[in-house]
Amino acid sequence: MTTIRFAGAQIPVTPYTQTNVMEIRRAIDWAAENRVDYLVTPEASLSGYTKDFHNNHNRIIDALLEIEKYAANKHVGLCLGTLWDELDGIRRNQIRFYNPEGIFLGAVNKHFQIEYDTEVGVLGDSRKYLIALPINDKIIPIGGLICVDMYGVPDQPSIPYILKNLGATVLIHSTNGIRNIKPTNGLSTELSDQIANDWHDINLRRASFLRRTPILTVDNCYMFDGTEYYGNTSSESGVLIDGEWVTKVPRSGTQYFYYDLPLTNIAIDMPDFFKST
């Protein structure tokens, strides 16, 4: 085995848990057919990015169990975006990582909140994590970022920079960005969306170029609150290496993609212990 196949699923993220389960199952089916090792889904793809999340948590527990079993049966590893209530009672916005056998490897929490996160009851988590994906007798140190974590906020450190310094060799970015919103400054929606697109694009390319770290990014293809939508996503879904898009998909509707990364570039010898920080 000389490469590992990462894939992304640009899928609708709705307020309805069972609808989301079916979308993720279809993505897992595609991943299994295409011999994908790890499949990445958008931010909050299981739970939905919804204000009434607290009323649905039991359903989300059941849905997560269903997806865990389904992916394990298909032998597809997951980097699964969802809101989740942790044992400490705090709701977080996560990427949950599972190996192809269905073993839970850990979760990365969203570091920086946007205003809507406060509305849905998600607490930002300033801890920085790496996840160790086991591969043969080595590991791939993965840095996980959710939405604005990639782009940063004023007066706060760069998360891609921190993760690179901690040893990340691949960055996984699950997002669910705002799009098609008429700005309050009088600009047209079309111009506002174009400026936002260029801003997302140059920040993704810059992070990949400066950090010399492959980035896989995937967006929701509906509105970020789950409203049905067939326009452009807020940002491209695809893979960047050294500042260039090596694969990307159309900006609307359900789209799947994969890319094979050489293990010589991203895997390291298994250390005596792997410490998350």
Image: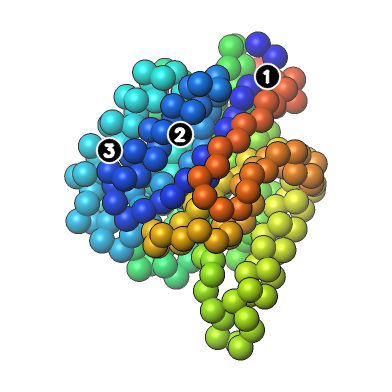
- Checking the image for residue 27, the label placed there is 2
Indicate left or right for 228 with 88 as reference: right
Residue pushed farthest bottom?
Answer: 186
Under circle 2, the secondary element is helix
Of labels 1 and 2, earlier in sequence is 1
Q: Is residue 240 above or below residue 102?
A: below
Q: Is residue 257 above or below residue 126?
A: above
Q: Nearer the viewer, residue 82 or 188?
A: 188
Per the image, the residue denoted by label 3 is: 63
- Indicate the amino acid at tag 2: Ala
Q: Nearer the viewer, residue 156 or 29?
A: 29
Gap between marks 1 and 2 measured at Cα? 21 Å
Across and down, in percent, residue 185 comes to 60, 87
Indicate left or right for 61 with 228 as reference: left
- Indicate the amino acid at tag 3: Ala
Gap between marks 3 and 1 measured at Cα? 31 Å
- Checking the image for residue 3, the label placed there is 1
Q: Residues within 10 Å of mark 3 (few under 14, many from 20)?
A: some
Q: Residues within 10 Å of mark 1 (few under 14, many from 20)?
A: some
> Which label lies toward us, 1 or 2?
2
Under circle 3, the secondary element is helix
Q: Is residue 180 above or below residue 68?
A: below
Gap between marks 2 and 3 measured at Cα? 15 Å
Across and down, in percent, residue 183 comes to 56, 81
Of labels 2 and 3, earlier in sequence is 2
Across and down, in percent, residue 7 comes to 57, 33
Q: Nearer the viewer, residue 101 or 71?
A: 71
